[in-house]
């Protein structure tokens, strides 16, 4: 029978015997894996159209059935579905954060007797990961006190000492780009559009250097500058000096855009609202004034303190809604810019000093020889029981040997606070201060040279137009040029007279 079945090439009849469950298949009886499929399994994947996707919610998805173009309709449907899934993921993350009861990354006290401000920097460095612990550093330098400034992506740091020591470096890798000994007074430093250029407010003028420390320009119209600010969307470098003049320089064309006379004496406090590009000046009589290039007078004038201002900062969240000011009288005030009223006020020990907001709303205050931080929403929520009670303290770090504390800067996208003082620069760990997510089109901490060039070109193309300045408020040289009466001897005479309202380009 078997020989007949073999000759006929037929299938043997199926045996109806039940399989024995007690017998297990031996490894040798298992089919051998396919070597080809195993080798390509780790490097191949299903096409995106065949991958399983999460079901979309029944409501909230916008329909584009009215669009006749099929490719455009599919693209809009895909974007709408992506937006709905992103919103659902954000809602889930917010729900989880609310259930936990605290902001992600913040320190929490275990019990009622514990306080977060008792935790020191050494204990925080031991508790966090190795990469975060390496960000806690101390740079002991002799040219202090120092002013600090980070780039917009938080990757590079520039420092300027009062005695002329200036440096620009990648603080995460330790790569030094430039280090200068200018041998004259330096009052402030700021980066321009990226780390390839930085400006230094020196004793008499503002100088611009490239990444290698080579001097490129001398801005002779910015006399005795004390503070610098750069407006990235308008490519404007603003400075204020001992003469009380606020000047805007266009770094893309080299022209002096505007020069305003504040008539309030020397100014040592300057900050900006990153959302509206409005500059905030703090004066010796306790006033805070708001300026724009197209107005020769302050848009807002606020009597903030009874004495001189020591520091001012604008909260980057909520479109710059809150303004924090500190006076030499030791008072710290938080203002609501919608009604210009004080929402929180308290006193600090050792007099007033610098103030700074982080991306997540943490407020840092330097007073005396220590740095204190306060968490939102307590730092801008009024307390009805005692209006002058300080908000709950989050973290504090004493620096008695570094007096005076002259600079506070939060590093973007990281939980690091750079403190400039007389002994150098200290980087402190402040958990929960930095924004964890970044927009690579605005500021990318991991950008390469090609991406930086593309972002620079895109920034020039999308540069915000400087508001038109009326003819009567333009500098004299520009008025003469427009009337066709400009001559070289007029420019020389204006340079000899040292007129503060003169306009011009690079030197």
Image (cartoon, rainbow, N blue to C red):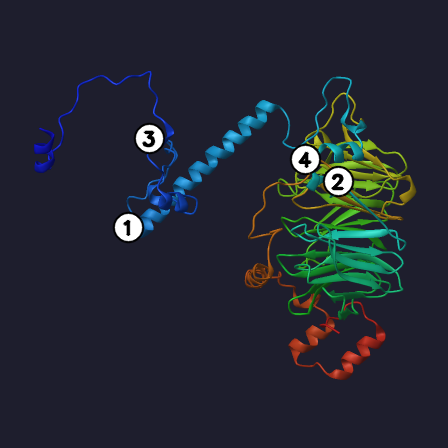
Answer yes or no: do the residues labelled 1 and 4 have beta carbons within 8 Å? no
Query: Residue 421: x percent and y percent?
Result: 86, 47
Q: Which mark is residue 324?
A: 2
Q: Which residue does the numbered mark 4 point to in the structure image?
A: 432
Residue lying at 17% horizontally and 22% vertically, measured from the top left: 15
Residue lying at 57% horizontally and 62% vertically, measured from the top left: 450
Closest to the observer, 201 or 117: 117
Query: Residue 201: x percent and y percent?
Result: 81, 61
Q: Nearer the viewer, mark 2 or mark 3?
A: 3
Q: Quadrant of the N terminus?
A: top left
Of the numbered discs 4 and 2, the one sitting upstream in the chain is 2
Answer yes or no: do the residues labelled 2 and 3 have beta carbons within 8 Å? no
Query: Residue 218: x percent and y percent?
Result: 78, 70
Q: Which residue does the numbered mark 1 point to in the structure image?
A: 70
Q: Which residue does the numbered mark 3 point to in the structure image?
A: 29
Of the numbered discs 1 and 4, the one sitting upstream in the chain is 1
Query: Residue 84: x percent and y percent?
Result: 42, 37
Q: Quadrant of residue 8?
A: top left
Q: Quadrant of residue 170?
A: bottom right
Mark-to-mark CA distance, 2 and 3: 76 Å
Closest to the observer, 338 or 116: 116
Mark-to-mark CA distance, 4 and 2: 20 Å
Mark-to-mark CA distance, 4 and 3: 57 Å
- Tell me: 357 left or right of 122: left
Q: Is residue 496 at least partly visible in the picture? A: yes
Q: Give the structural element (helix, strand or loop) at label 3.
A: helix
Q: Nearer the viewer, mark 4 or mark 2?
A: 4
Q: Is residue 48 at least partly visible in the picture? A: no
Q: Give the structural element (helix, strand or loop) at label 1.
A: helix
Mark-to-mark CA distance, 1 and 3: 53 Å
């Amino acid at each position: 029978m078997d020989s007949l079945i073999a000759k006929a090439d037929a299938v043997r009849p199926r045996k109806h015997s039940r399989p024995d469950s007690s017998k297990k298949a031996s490894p040798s009886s298992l089919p051998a894996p396919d070597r080809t499929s195993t080798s390509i399994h780790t490097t191949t994947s299903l096409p995106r159209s065949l991958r399983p996707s999460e079901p979309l919610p029944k409501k909230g998805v916008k329909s584009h059935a009215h669009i006749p173009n099929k490719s455009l309709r599919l693209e809009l449907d895909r974007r709408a579905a992506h937006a709905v899934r992103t919103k659902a993921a954000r809602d889930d993350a917010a729900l989880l954060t609310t259930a936990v009861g605290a902001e992600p990354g913040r320190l929490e006290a275990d019990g009622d007797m514990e306080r977060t401000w008792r935790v020191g920097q050494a204990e925080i460095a031991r508790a966090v990961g190795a990469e975060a612990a390496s960000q806690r550093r101390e740079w002991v330098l002799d040219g202090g006190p120092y002013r600090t400034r980070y780039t917009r992506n938080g990757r590079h740091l520039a420092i300027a000492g009062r005695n002329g020591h200036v440096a620009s470096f990648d603080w995460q890798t330790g790569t030094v780009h430039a280090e200068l000994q200018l041998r004259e007074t330096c009052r402030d430093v700021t980066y321009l559009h990226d780390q390839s250029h930085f400006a230094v407010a020196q004793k008499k003028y503002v100088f611009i250097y490239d990444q290698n420390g080579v001097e490129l320009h001398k801005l002779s119209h910015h006399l005795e500058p004390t503070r610098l600010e750069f407006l990235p969307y308008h490519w404007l470098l603003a400075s204020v000096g001992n003469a009380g003049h606020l000047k805007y320089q266009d770094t893309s064309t080299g022209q002096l855009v505007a020069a305003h006379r504040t008539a309030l004496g020397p100014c040592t406090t300057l900050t900006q609202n990153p959302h509206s590009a409005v500059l905030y000046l703090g004066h010796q009589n306790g006033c805070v004034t708001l300026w724009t290039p197209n107005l020769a007078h302050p848009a807002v004038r606020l009597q903030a303190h009874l004495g001189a201002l020591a520091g001012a900062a604008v909260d980057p969240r909520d479109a710059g809604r809150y303004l924090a000011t500190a006076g030499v009288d030791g008072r710290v005030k938080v203002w609501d810019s919608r009604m210009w009223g004080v929402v929180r006020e308290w006193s600090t020990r050792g007099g007033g000093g610098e103030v700074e907001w982080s991306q997540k709303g943490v407020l840092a205050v330097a007073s005396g020889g220590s740095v204190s931080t306060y968490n939102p929403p307590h730092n801008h929520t009024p307390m009805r029981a005692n209006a002058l009670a300080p908000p709950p303290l989050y973290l504090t770090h004493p620096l008695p040997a570094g007096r005076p504390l002259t600079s506070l800067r939060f590093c973007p996208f990281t939980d690091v606070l750079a403190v400039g003082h007389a002994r150098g620069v200290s980087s402190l760990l402040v958990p929960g201060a930095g924004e964890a997510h970044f927009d690579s089109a605005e500021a990318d901490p991991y950008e390469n040279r090609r991406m930086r060039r593309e972002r620079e070109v895109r920034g020039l193309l999308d540069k915000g137009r400087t508001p038109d300045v009326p003819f009567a408020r333009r500098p004299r040289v520009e008025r003469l040029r427009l009337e066709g009466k400009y001559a070289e001897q007029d420019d020389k005479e204006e340079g000899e007279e040292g007129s503060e309202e003169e306009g011009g380009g690079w030197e």
